[in-house]
Image (tube, rainbow, N blue to C red):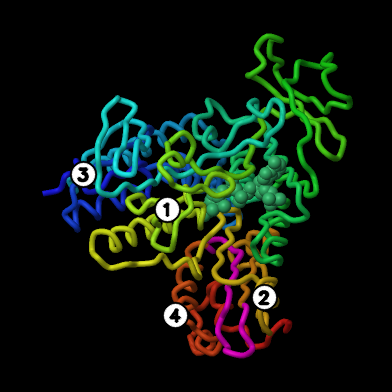
Amino acid sequence: MSTFDYDLFVIGGGSGGVRAARVAAGEAGAKVALAEEDRYGGTCVIRGCVPKKLMVFASGYGGMVEEAIHYGWDMLNRGFDWQTFSGHLNTELDRLEGVYRKLLAGSGVTTYDARARLKDAHTVELSTGETFTAKHILVATGGRPLRPDMPNAHLGIVSDDIFHLDQLPKSILIIGGGYIACEFACILAGLGVEVTQYYRGAQILRGFDDEARGLIAESMRELGVDLHTGTNIVEMDCYRGEDDDGMDAPVEATQYAMPAKDAPQEGPLKVKSTNGHVKVFDQVLFATGRRPNSDDMGLEEVGVTLKRGGAIEVDAYSQTKVPSIYAIGDVTDRVNLTPVAIREGMAFVDTVFHGNPTPVDHDLIPSAVFTQPELGTVGLTEEQARDQEEIEVYCTSFRPMQSAFADKPGRVLMKLIVSKKTRKVLGCHIVAPGAGEMIQMAGIAIKMGATKEDFDRTVAVHPTMSEEIVTMRKPMRTA
Ligand code: NDP
């Protein structure tokens, strides 16, 4: 008989925590509880991947209507209605949260709608005042958007806020050049918002393949995003009209309804940037990274160590310095992707409840950036691979049939990085509509260790964009 209230207490009801709790209870027969202070489903379901992808779909229809007209359809695009979309979005998110709650209940997991913190290595204290003991504690509290440390940063919004806007802004400034900045720049431009993006570095999407980054930047500009690289925000404040003297002129103010002087949180913002310009935007979105949710949880007090930036330090089995406490997902800041958190949750259950120590395999993880077009990527970039060994680069860029017919400018990119010595495909980078779907398939072959010759042996599916992946005969360059 266990002397603990539970075999496992999970803190955090996002993708990783819910999966670990369900599997531990449902498959391993453990007595499991889970505490969540907010909505079940976490970042991915409630304020990340899912609502973002639905917005990607929504933003794509405008261009599709234009394209359809070129294909002979008699259509009228009367514009996008945010209220209709956000109503349907909220209904869908409520449904999904209900599904998550049902899955937990169906697996026999006891849930507490409360904030939890650690009291000791085996005790969790809830904001309701209750305390529970558990043989194992799993921290899966995720992360949250981070605003830069500058005066008035609170006047800007972060990605969580986008889904709760009463109306779409007419204009927005997006700060950052990562996944979230680029995805929302494309989404909002597609929905008709005037989008300006400032990125402090030389090229957006740092860490991805340079050629792919270049093409995404070009495509974003074609989409209408006013993208400024080597540019950052310096100051921001509320804009109070043409007689506003809070910052240096010239203010390129246009058609805004001016807010009352004592209502600073509503209405346009003026922004001074490193290039010396002062411009006015309806909204400023900070997409400047995320921070692990590890604050005020009693972690360090019980002996769990945190890394710089607040991430929980864990070993390959997701175990912290305190043997009974494990951590998975974004709070550990390893690879911050939903399917990785889920994998880490499953590996934790195998390790702890099935007696099968399972390290998490973080190698060759395919992923996608949902820009327009999408970027699908797996393995090494050209830049990483050539630092490691001699490589061949197979690459092609072309206008795809569907958009060429509609006289649209967009190009796609198919790229393979191949080891000269082993012939293995070390990396695959696709910029194309549907690249997220394509890279999942390519990821299987590359994870299996496929060589360039394995790709070549595969017959093309014609006519598709992805057939180029198996028909590139000569390397574009070697390095
Ligand atoms: P990223 O770390 O990807 O990007 C943050 C961006 O903000 C970078 O361009 C960074 O610049 C810039 N930045 C950071 N601090 C400042 C500052 N003080 N001033 C100006 N710019 C700054 O974070 P995101 O928030 O975009 O995404 C977080 C994580 O979420 C991703 O890494 C990813 O793991 C996950 N995610 C995955 C998605 C997917 O799979 N499709 C979608 C969305 C998120 P610099 O490059 O110079 O550091």
SS of the residue under disc 4: loop
Report the span colored magenta: 417-435
Mark 3 → mark 1, Cα distance in angstroms: 21 Å
Relative to 41, residue 235 above or below: above
Query: Mark 3–mark 4 contact, CB under 8 Å?
Result: no
Of the two numbered discs 1 and 2 in the rendering, the one whose residue sits closer to the viewer: 1
Of the two numbered discs 1 and 4 in the rendering, the one whose residue sits closer to the viewer: 1
Task: Determine crowd level at label 2: few under 14, some 14-19, many 20+ residues with C-alpha closer than 10 A.
Answer: some
Residue topped by disc 4: 448
x and y percent of residue 463 in the render? Answer: 53, 75
Query: Mark 2–mark 4 contact, CB under 8 Å?
Result: no
Residue type at numbered disc 2: Thr
- Residue in the foreground of this view, choosing between 237 and 460: 237
Labels 1 and 2: the sequence-earlier one: 1
SS of the residue under disc 2: strand
Q: Residue at x 84, y 13 (%)?
A: 243
Labels 3 and 1: the sequence-earlier one: 3
- Residue in the foreground of this view, choosing between 422 and 51: 422
Relative to 254, residue 22 above or below: below
Residue topped by disc 2: 396
Residue type at numbered disc 4: Met
Residue topped by disc 3: 6
